[in-house]
Image (cartoon, rainbow, N blue to C red):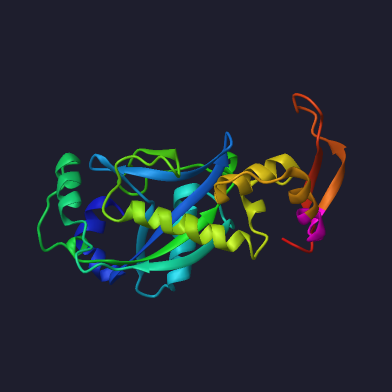
């Protein structure tokens, strides 16, 4: 679907007033990062709309694959955002003028949209970002140091991080931010970045090993600068 068809006939294809936004989280250089897109001078989350014959969950999977090239990353619905004034009308007006498209106030995309917010955990090195149908510029930003954000998207990111903090204390999902093979210090740094505090090394390692979900590999990490830590991977029965 090209831009002209999307703008003029989108109401025929998509559910009215419902969208999906995805907080795509990755970990690099010791920091938790989020993938953002530039939209009319501000930054926003990758998102999209739900086809009329499509489940909301399937729409989120589709949008995530379109934006990252990843087929099966960790993805979770965590909250609905639907303020009564939640509309992108002014932002779309500026964007369409800039790309040479006609803008009308009664276009379907100018309506109020309730969004189903998801968060995804990805290995940044595997992501191949795209700018969506509008070919928007994209980049990774530190979650705690966001640029000027569109509408309520900063609020959505904060809510996703708070949800992730709760989730990693109950479930073994932080591994999704790492490559298949990783070290215990790398795993610890991810937990520290999410929780916002330092963790005692031996206690953390003991806790992780007690979960019985990790398999220690016979080879250490060769490119470690000092002492070479052991490599681990998640056991096959615990994908």
Q: Residue furthest left?
A: 105
> Residue 136 falls in which quadrant of the image?
top left
- Residue 49's place in the image compared with 43, above or below, is below
Query: Is residue 209 a member of the stretch shown in magenta?
Result: yes
Identify the residue shown where x is 47% and y is 66%.
78
Query: Quarter of the image holding residue 145?
Result: top left
Image coordinates for residue 37, horizontal then vertical, percent? 36, 44
Q: Is residue 15 left or right of residue 203?
A: left
Q: Quadrant of residue 166?
A: bottom right
**Residue bounds of the magenta highlight:** 207-214
Residue placed furthest toward the top: 225
Which quadrant of the rendered structure holds the N terminus?
Answer: bottom left
Residue 177 % position (x, y): 61, 48
Q: Nearer the viewer, residue 105 or 229?
A: 229
Name the residue at 33% across, 53% down.
153
Percent coordinates x, y for residue 7 in the rendering:
21, 57
Question: Can residue 162 be seen from the camera position used here?
Answer: yes
Give percent across and percent down for residue 80.
37, 69
Q: Quadrant of the C terminus?
A: bottom right
Q: Is residue 208 left or right of residue 4?
A: right
In this view, the residue in front, 209 or 174, is: 209
Residue 23 painted magenta: no
């Amino acid at each position: 679907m090209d831009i002209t068809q999307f703008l003029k006939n989108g109401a025929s294809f998509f559910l009215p007033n419902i969208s999906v936004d995805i907080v795509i989280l990755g970990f690099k250089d010791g920091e938790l990062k989020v993938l953002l897109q530039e939209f009319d001078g501000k930054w926003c989350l990758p998102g999209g709309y739900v086809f009329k014959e499509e489940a909301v969950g399937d729409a989120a999977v589709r949008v995530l694959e379109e934006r990252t090239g990843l087929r099966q990353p960790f993805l979770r619905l965590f909250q609905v955002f639907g303020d009564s004034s939640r509309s992108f009308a002014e932002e779309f007006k500026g964007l369409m003028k800039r790309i040479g498209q006609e803008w009308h106030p009664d276009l379907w995309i100018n309506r109020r949209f309730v969004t189903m917010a998801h968060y995804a955990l990805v290995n940044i090195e595997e992501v191949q970002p795209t700018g969506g149908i509008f070919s928007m510029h994209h980049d990774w930003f530190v979650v705690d140091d966001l640029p000027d954000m569109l509408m309520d998207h900063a609020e959505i990111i904060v809510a996703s991080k708070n949800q992730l903090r709760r989730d990693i204390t109950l479930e073994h999902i932080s591994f999704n931010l790492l490559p298949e093979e990783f070290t215990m210090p790398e795993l610890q740094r991810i937990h520290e970045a999410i929780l916002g505090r330092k963790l005692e090394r031996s206690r953390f390692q003991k806790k992780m090993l007690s979960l019985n979900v990790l398999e220690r590999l016979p080879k250490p990490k060769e490119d470690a600068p000092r002492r070479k830590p052991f490599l681990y991977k998640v056991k096959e029965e615990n994908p």
